[in-house]
Image (spheres, rainbow, N blue to C red):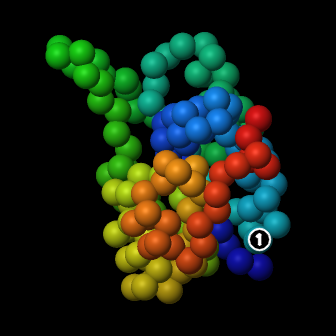
Amino acid sequence: MKKIAIFADVQNIYYTTRQAYQRQFNYRRLWHRVSKQGEIVEAVAYAIDRGDSQQKAFQSALRDIGFEVKLKPFIQRMDGSAKGDWDVGITIDVMESAINADIVILLSGDGDFDMLMQHIKTKRSITTEVYGVPDLTAKSLSDSVDHFHAIGEGLLM
């Protein structure tokens, strides 16, 4: 049985599915679909913590599905911009977990991850997959993996 590790860039998936479909991503359906491929040995969801009750309920639902939820505080800068980026954290976790997985699945459309996915695919001979909204996923990311899965009707709430 294949060992699968899933890494979810929650903010990216939230904003891209909202922009493209005005709907939310269904993590439970994803879990059900991926579990047919093998054993999910690790699943991490990376999110920004604003501390509101709706967000806490969502994080609890992710934990109930089987995800470990990692949070960073939402930081509002003096100039009005915001910060809350998980790119380095996701990269470190993928690199560390890749030795224990046959398949690494990333939920994101962020092109910053193209080199990471290409690296674990070629240097570690791991099957790589990305789930992303087709029109909002960087071509460099979808080109860097073995399989790109378009988020559409079957994975939306």
In the image, 41: left or right of 64? left
Residue 43 seen in this snapshot: yes
Q: Position of residue 73 (x, y in %)?
A: 38, 26
Q: Note whether 65 is above or below 131 in the view shown.
A: above
- Please state which of residues 14 and 97 is positioned toward the viewer in this rendering: 14
Please state which amino acid type lies under the numbered disc 1.
Answer: Gln
Indicate the quadrant containing the N terminus: top left, top right, bottom left or bottom right: bottom right
In the shown orientation, is residue 63 left or right of residue 79?
right
Give the answer, above or below, for where 139 lies relative to 24: below
The residue sitting at 76% across, 71% down in the picture is: 38
* Residue found 41% across the figure and 52% down from its top: 110
Q: Quadrant of residue 60?
A: top right
Establish if 87 lies above or below 100.
Answer: above
Give x and y (percent) for residue 5.
Answer: 60, 63
Q: Quadrant of the C terminus?
A: top right
Identify the residue at horizontal 66%, vertical 51% (top origin).
Answer: 151
| Between 16 and 8, the one nearer to me in the picture | 16
The picture places residue 7, in percent across and down from the top left corner, at 54, 54
Q: Is residue 44 visible?
A: no
Residue that numbered label 1 is attached to: 37
Residue 127 lies left or right of residue 137; in this view the side is right
- Foreground residue among 41 and 150: 150
Q: Residue at x 32, y 52 (%)?
A: 88
